[in-house]
């Protein structure tokens, strides 16, 4: 276990990233627990409203991100300071992304349907950072052999092809697949070759004169949403709390 830890975490310099991820997840979970207690009127926790102004936790989150980011940039060498910076930065990210929907809508939508986007972006961020910790690099560059790594054309071709798959998946309205496909190219390829979402840019451009393709896209989107939306909602409600009716 010690050998694996040194070879996969310490030696590649991934310890600060692991600390940031751990502090990010822990901060998010603690924050959600506190906000749910405040919502239910339990415990000693209350909203912070000095002078009648509701201070959202995105504010201290931004402060922690700034402090942690600048400490990390100032400490070029690995050490205790880098670890502290990683923890502060992870805590700040946890607080900020917990109110991602508020930043997106510029409104207090924390307990509304729109507020569930915060939970979705947190889950996606955790997944992407976990892929990086697992050794996945963008656009499949890490899958090249030692001989191929010396061939710049091969590297450029690999990046370009995988980037194209991700872009096509995004244009087809499959944002989550496109983002994950940046790190796992096969996922982006899967999204690129399948039917586009009915209201995507791809569908509006290429299915305009193909009524059968439009109908198939609508049917497939309906079946997909019916199958997975309920599950996604239950997971999101379990993690972040159900929105207000």
Image (cartoon, rainbow, N blue to C red):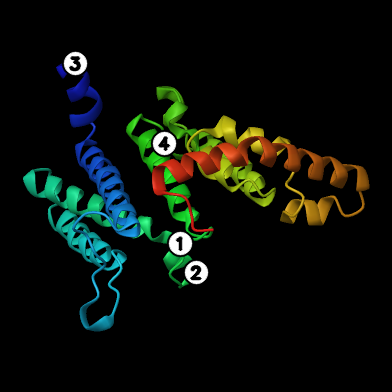
Q: Is residue 166 above or below residue 199?
A: above
Left or right, 18 with respect to 109, comes to left
Q: Nearer the viewer, mark 3 or mark 1?
A: 1
Mark 1 secondary-structure assignment: helix
Q: Are marks 2 and 1 in contact (CB under 8 Å)?
A: yes
Which badge, 4 or 3, is on the more N-terminal residue? Answer: 3
> Depth check: 170 or 229 in front?
229
User: Tag on residue 148?
Assistant: none
Where is residue 142, by image quadrant?
top left
Q: How far is the residue under mark 3 from the one under mark 2?
A: 45 Å
Mark 3 secondary-structure assignment: loop
Residue at 12%, 53% in the rendered image: 75
Residue underneath mark 2: 105
Q: Nearer the viewer, mark 1 or mark 4?
A: 1
From the top left corner, tell me how far across and down residue 202 is, in percent.
75, 52
Residue underneath mark 1: 101
Q: How far is the residue under mark 4 from the one under mark 3?
A: 24 Å
């Amino acid at each position: 276990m010690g050998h694996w830890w040194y070879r996969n975490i310490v030696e590649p310099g991934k310890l600060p990233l692991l600390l940031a991820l751990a502090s990010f997840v822990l901060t998010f979970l603690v924050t959600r627990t506190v906000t749910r207690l405040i919502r239910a009127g339990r415990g000693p926790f209350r909203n912070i409203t000095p002078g009648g102004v509701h201070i959202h936790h995105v504010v201290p989150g931004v402060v922690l991100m700034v402090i942690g980011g600048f400490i990390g940039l100032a400490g070029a060498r690995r050490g205790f300071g880098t670890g502290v910076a990683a923890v502060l930065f992870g805590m700040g990210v946890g607080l900020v992304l917990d109110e991602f929907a508020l930043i997106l809508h510029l409104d207090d939508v924390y307990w509304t349907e729109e507020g569930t986007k915060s939970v979705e972006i947190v889950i996606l961020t955790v997944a992407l950072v976990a892929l990086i910790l697992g050794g996945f690099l963008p656009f499949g560059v890490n899958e090249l052999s030692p001989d191929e790594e010396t061939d710049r054309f091969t590297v450029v071709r690999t990046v370009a092809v995988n980037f194209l798959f991700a872009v096509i998946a995004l244009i087809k309205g499959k944002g989550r697949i496109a983002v994950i496909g940046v790190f796992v190219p096969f996922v982006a390829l899967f999204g690129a070759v399948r039917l586009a979402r009915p209201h995507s840019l791809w569908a509006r451009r290429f299915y305009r004169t193909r009524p059968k393709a439009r109908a198939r896209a609508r049917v497939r989107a309906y079946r997909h949403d019916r199958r997975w939306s309920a599950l996604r909602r239950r997971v999101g409600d379990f993690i972040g709390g159900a929105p207000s009716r």
